[in-house]
Image: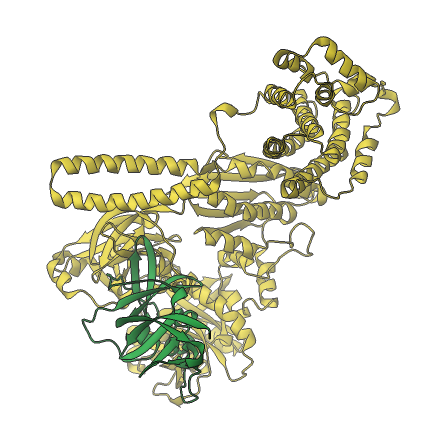
Chain colours: A green, B yellow
Amino acid sequence: MAHTSQFCTFYLDKLLFGVELKGVQEVIRSLEMTKVPLAPAVVSGLINLRGQIVTAVDLRRRLELEPSPPGALPMNVVVRSDDGSVSLLVDEIGDVVEVEETTFEPPPETLRGSVRNMILGVHKLNGRLMHVLDIEKACQMVDVAEAAAAGR
Amino acid sequence: MSESDNDSSIVKDFLIESYENLDRLDRELVGLEKNPEDRDALASVFRTIHTIKGTCGFLGFNKLEAVAHVGENLLTRLRDRQLTLTPEITTALLNMVDAVRQMLGEIEKDGKEGERDDSVLIATLTRLQQVPAAAAAVPQAANEVAEPLPPNIGDILQQTAGVTVAEIRLATEKQREGDPRRLGEILVEHGAIRPADVVDALRIQQSNRVAAAPASDSTIRVDVGLLDKVMNLVGELVLARNQVLQFANRMKDTGFLAASQRLNLITTELQAGVMKTRMQPIGNIWSQFPRTVRDVALGCGKEVRIEMEGKETELDKTIIEAIKDPLTHLVRNSVDHGIELPEVRVKAGKDRVGRLILRAFHEGGQVIIEIGDDGAGLNVERIRKKAVERAVITAEQATRMSEREIFNLIFLPGFSTAEKVSNVSGRGVGMDVVKTNVEKIGGTVDVQSTMGQGTTVRVRIPLTLAIIPALIVTCSGERYAIPQVNLLELVRLKAEEVGKGIELVHGAPVYRLRGRLLPLVYLNRELSLTADAKLSAESNGAVNIVVLQADERQFGLVVDQINDTEEIVVKPLRKQLKTVKIFAGSSIMGDGRVALILDVLGVAQHAGVVAETRDQAVADKAPEEAVATDADKQTFLLFAGPGGSRMAIPLSSLARLEEFPVAKVEMSGSQWVTQYRGNILPLIRLDVVLARSSERLALETPPRPDAGPIQVLVLNHEGRTFGLVVERILDIVEDRAEVRSAANRPAVLYDVIIGNRVTELLDIPAILRIADVSALRSSPVASIAEVAN
């Protein structure tokens, strides 16, 4: 019996992503958000998670995908990072899937740029690929363009 | 000992009590040294040591007992006036206290005394006991065994455990015959009493002896973790209360309203009560300073008297803990570096004994702690030189920094003005650590000094960290909290007043607040938000100004709406968001949404109200400059010339930056001059120089008396010193300034791109030529200049 692990899956711009289930604190519907002016653009804002203030990261922007259509209500995948809880904003929640190690493959060499850091690899599921996200990296709140601008 | 859990709890009590006793010993011994005739203090010291010795003998800590025992013997001699207290004896006794404290630490860790060798200490203490032959009166042997302090343990045991006089006599007999054990132990062995009786008796004995100690019955010890938890819960309760209150106001149900108001009152009181449990007088940490000062002063041969004011000032426990080390460092520093040697002091006409003053008081919701000395003071020039030597700042920066800014350089890392590193300062925390630690808890440090008269370090810290009163404002649809501490007043300008109320100083909006110009900062612009069109329409163009205080500067923050004041629970921002200096934290509002707390100093710096930004930027840049070996890069001073045009000169040509009030400007013919460091400094006006020659004459008028202070760049060129009057100093930047194009005005060398913007690089010789030509017609200053040329 090969090693299996569980992933919490979600969709971003029709792509399937997964984070390891044990790193996920909870999944909640869209919450009211307070914007943080002057913060890096990947920070969507702050949410009140039962008295705990959690930073929400715009995962689409973090992964350099198209911005979400106006009016869309993103879901919160709250994950535990080294620096407290962070909410990753996603389009839609998928199932919890159990995968075997054998279906894993590292990202292809043709995947370039900063995104490559965040994507550990893919699991080949039935009919589609699940991108495995590195939680710590995804929670870092700098986007590349801004890092360059900040160094002016 | 038979009952092991009983035993461990006794040990714990013993530890806590002993620690307190040791702290008291430190204080009393230092007090005693100053006043050796104080019999009460001596008796108290004696009692304390005796108690420690007694208890640890009972608990079987033999080494500890041995150390305490020789200390006690020494004290006996002192008490019986066979010896007088000398600094040597005090030092030995203090060393004993330290040894005991270390052993207690070991006991606390693993229940054992540890592998210590105290023979040297014991030998010293024994040697000091040697009474000078003349004064020697042979101590009675009985004195050694049965301490004369009534009531002794035997008396108590008689009363409480029903021990007979005969049994006690038997036991004391045994002791006299050489049994090393304590009375209680012998009695237990004989079966006269149970161990618990001895414990009780010891307790009674102790409480009798420490009768002077604070009423122990009315206080309890509480675990700090528990208090923290209660504090957090109260924080949550405050939030819930705020939410309920908002509902109550909306519901208009009188019953509910009354209930929620009661809830409001009770919560407020509960909050105050819980906060109080965490408050401690600052005297708690100050009490160890006399000892610190004594040790340091003795170590460097100085005489220092410590004075304290406001010992009772209370602070939150976490804050007290956080400032303990910084304060200790500052105190050590004052004694080590601040106060001079006695001979030097006498020569300077001061009292031999230096004065160290600790002062604590409340001011505007903050606690101020001052550590002042009447020592030599800081030497501005030396710091300036050192800073340049160490490449902390460049020579150019050094020349334009004010005295106060120079003083504050001592807080930069790797900066010590001590001629040599002594074993006192320069180990462990440095001034930069002091600053970081104080800033970590939201405080500030500032240093003031007068050469020859002393130095005062002022530490400003918040009362508590958890819950603060704040003003809630709205800007572009979002709410922001402004800590009440920074708030001075609120001003609302009606639409018809806005036009003449808000004036522009070269594009920078200001408001006349009781005759003084208040710089205005628009929050939405600072936060790069778009103005809320709907709201500004609603408010009919009225302007709300929140007058704030940031680091001794005042400014007006323009917001869309001023809501209310509220108690908010401060939650820190995530580490990664802390780079946004404009926010101090976040909080959850009554409706459950998150609001950001503005850091007023951060806003001021962001808007450029507080000069520190510039210095900060300079300080931040300094190390980079040191690293950047690119020879191509040049440092420029950026400033705004006439008409707001962006101009620059190489920083190397700059001697100083000055600001003169218009009243200081005098006329010499049509030339502006001012008295500057004992010379006449010609002031060349850039607007005149850059004007077409036909228009120059018209411009050559005295300055308007009502104009603000003028900004002057003091320049040296070929041995001539002159001032260049500019509109405003912008920044100091480092740039390659590669892209160049020919200039279109005579005094400009060429147009370059600095910091991504087109900037005119001035041609200093050309300016001098033009100025001389125009001044030659009438100005005697110019002719002097000609001679110099």
Query: Which corner quadrant of the image does residue B302 belong to?
Result: top right
> How many numbered marks are there?
0
- The answer, for residue B125, to whether it is visible in the render is yes
Q: Residue at x 61, y 14 (%)?
A: B160
Q: Where does residue B293 sit, x and y in percent of width and height?
A: 64, 40
Tell me: residue B708, above or below residue B467. below
Q: Where does residue B567 sit, x and y in percent of width and height?
A: 30, 45
- The answer, for residue B293, to whether it is visible in the render is no
Q: Is residue B363 left or right of residue B53?
A: left
Q: Residue at x 30, y 43 (%)?
A: B237
Q: Residue furthest right?
A: B133
Q: Quadrant of the N terminus of chain B?
A: top right
Query: Which corner quadrant of the image does residue B180 belong to?
Result: top right
Q: Where does residue B424 sit, x and y in percent of width and height?
A: 67, 49
Q: Residue at x 57, y 22 (%)?
A: B212
Q: Where does residue B155 sit, x and y in percent of width and height?
A: 67, 13
Tell me: residue B236, above or below residue B756. above
